[in-house]
Image (tube, grey):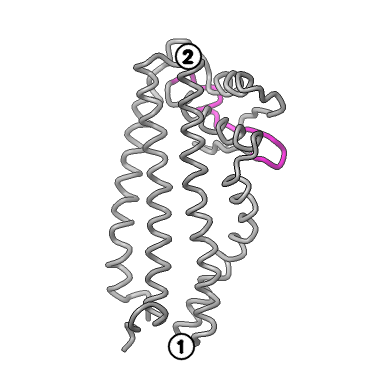
Amino acid sequence: MFFFDPLYFLLIAPAFLLSIIAQIWVKSAYNKYSQTPNMRGLSGAEAADYMLRAKGVHDVRIEISSGLLSDHYDPRDKTLRLSPEVYQGRTIAAIGIACHEAGHALQHAFGYAPLRLRTALVPITMIGSNLAWPLLFIGFIFHALTLIKLGILFFSGAVLFQLVTLPVEFNASFRALAAIKETGLLTADEFSGAKQVLTAAAMTYVAAAAAAILQLLYFLLRAGLLGRNHED
C-alpha cells in the first residue's frame, strides 16, 4: 500500500520538519509577547478598530469569538472575530494578531485579488478535500488510474488554495505592520515583537503549502504521471 512507501516519507519529511520548526517558533513568540503589555494599554479590539478607521473602513463589526487563537475575518458579513485573548488582551501579541486580521478586512474593502480568489476557492477546496483521499485510496488499492487521476485533480485544488493563501496572509501582515508603524499603535521595540509574532505565524502557512506541494508530487510520481512509476 502506498501509505507505507518510503518515498512518501522521504518527500514529506522536509515539510514535516519545517512545520515543527514553525510551530515551535509561533509558540515561543506568542508565549513571550502575549505576556508583554503594550505601553498604550490598547486591547486587540481597540487596535483593530483604530487601524480600520484610520484606513477609512467603517463598516466592519468586531466581535469576540470562542476558542484560543480563533481569530479570523469573515468577508460574508464583514465581521472581524477575535479570540478572548486577542479581543480583550492588552499585549503586543494581541495588537499584532488583531491588526493582521484587520489587514484581511482591508483586503476585502479594497478588492485585493488574491483574497477574492481564495474566497472563491473555498467551496471547491472543501469538496475536493473530501473526495481526493477516498479516490486516491481506492485508486491505488485497485490500480485504477482513472480514479487516481481524478483524486489528483481534486487534491490539486487544495494545493492551489494553499498557494493562494500565502500572498493573502503575507499581505495581511504587511498591511498590519505598516498600519501599526504609521499610527504609532506600538513603540519601535514593541513593533519588533509584533513582527516576530506575525512572521512566525506566516511560516506555518509556508510549511502547509510545502507539505501540500510535496504530497502532490508524490501522488504524481506514484501514479507514474511524472517520471517513472515507482511500482515497477
The amino acid type found where label 1 is placed reads His
At which x and y percent is residue 201?
A: 41, 39
At which x and y percent is residue 151?
A: 53, 74
The amino acid type found where label 2 is placed reads Gly
Please tell me whether residue 188 is drawn above or below residue 135 in the rendered image: above
Question: The residue tagged with tag 1: helix, strand or loop?
Answer: loop
At which x and y percent is residue 209?
A: 42, 54
Tell me how far mark 2 sits from mark 1, CA to CA: 61 Å
Question: The residue tagged with tag 2: helix, strand or loop?
Answer: loop
Kindly identify which residue carries mark 1: 143
Asked if residue 97 lies left or right of residue 63, the reply is: left
Kindly identify which residue carries mark 2: 184
Q: Residue at x 62, y 54 (%)?
A: 122
Asked if residue 8 lies left or right of residue 86, the reply is: left
Decide which of 108, 25 is in the foreground and name it. Answer: 108
Q: Residue at x 50, y 81 (%)?
A: 138
Decide which of 156, 47 is in the foreground and name it. Answer: 156
At which x and y percent is residue 88?
A: 54, 22
Please tell me whether residue 40 is drawn above or below residue 123 in the rendered image: above
Q: Residue at x 49, y 37 (%)?
A: 171
Question: Disc number at residue 14?
Answer: none
Give the magenta range.
74-91
